[in-house]
Image (cartoon, rainbow, N blue to C red):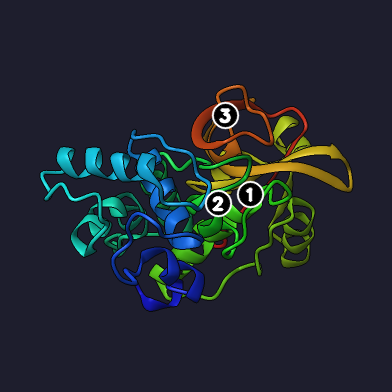
Amino acid sequence: MPNTIYTSHVRRELEFSGPIQRGARGMKARRVQEWVTFHGYATPVDADFGPATENAVQFFQQAASLPVTGIVDEATWNEMIVPLVRALAPIPINADDTPAKVLLRVAQQHLAQHPLELGGPNRGVWVRLYMGGNDGPEWLWCAGFVTFLLKQTCSLLERPMPIPGSYSCDSLAYQAREAGLFVYGTQLANGAVNWGALGDSQFFLVRRTSTDWTHTGLSFAGVHDTFSTIEGNTNDEGYNNGYEVCQRTRGISSKDFIRMPA
């Protein structure tokens, strides 16, 4: 992937900073705990590398056919972060690709790694990835997720961002209005705009009032009054403060959209 997406907070999640072992504390220990938990070897994410974390690392190493030491060396670290590397991997660009087409493929690449919260509400490596290095209960991350997808797409295409992006759904809506990219859901519902005019993918916004939107995600494959989504900070029930990236089907009621430029 072009280096423009490798901002400092992304590099911190990727780079190996030296062996991590029993007795380590702080973010180094926390990252290890998040990753072993992500891979199915759950341990408390408390930033304290104790015997439970050591055992979880050993289980991970054994499953990955690595030397079973309980110490996170560079080989172990590189194996742990494979899902993140895959989510950030370059995507081949075809001559007929539009931003909407590439955006959908980027979103599908993230979805395939099943990003989810680790260590508590709105916490963990995936939340920090999408939220500029921030995590914690107050960092609802659906808007950060779509903004990151858009940045990754524009980096691949070597194009400027059509809107600046934001961690706020309301800000995304206002940015789209200013850029002439905002589409009211009622325009789709009454036939004034058809799905084809929105391209292969777009962003949806869950509307609470005409000036307040509470959730966002990527939308695609719209037909009549339904569409498919790839969205973060949600779950199978469509909760707007869930715990994962997942694919869903939604109805058009109370939705607005942000289309991609050609």
Q: Quadrant of the N terminus?
A: bottom left
Residue farthest toward the top in the current orientation of the protein: 237
Q: Is residue 125 above or below residue 222?
A: below
Residue drawn at 79 percent across, 44 percent down: 213
Tag 3's secondary structure? loop
| Amino acid at dot 3 | Asn
Instruction: Name the side, left or right, on which 204 lies relative to 60.
Output: right
Quadrant of residue 73 within the rendered picture: bottom left
The residue that disc 2 covers is 127
Query: In front: 229, or 119?
Result: 119
Q: Residue 208, how many percent across, how many down?
A: 84, 36
Q: Is residue 160 above or below residue 75?
A: below
* Residue 221 in view here: yes
| Amino acid at dot 1 | Trp
* Marks 1 & 2, CB-CB < 8 Å contact: yes
Instruction: Name the side, left or right, on which 167 lies relative to 7.
Output: right
The residue that disc 3 covers is 235
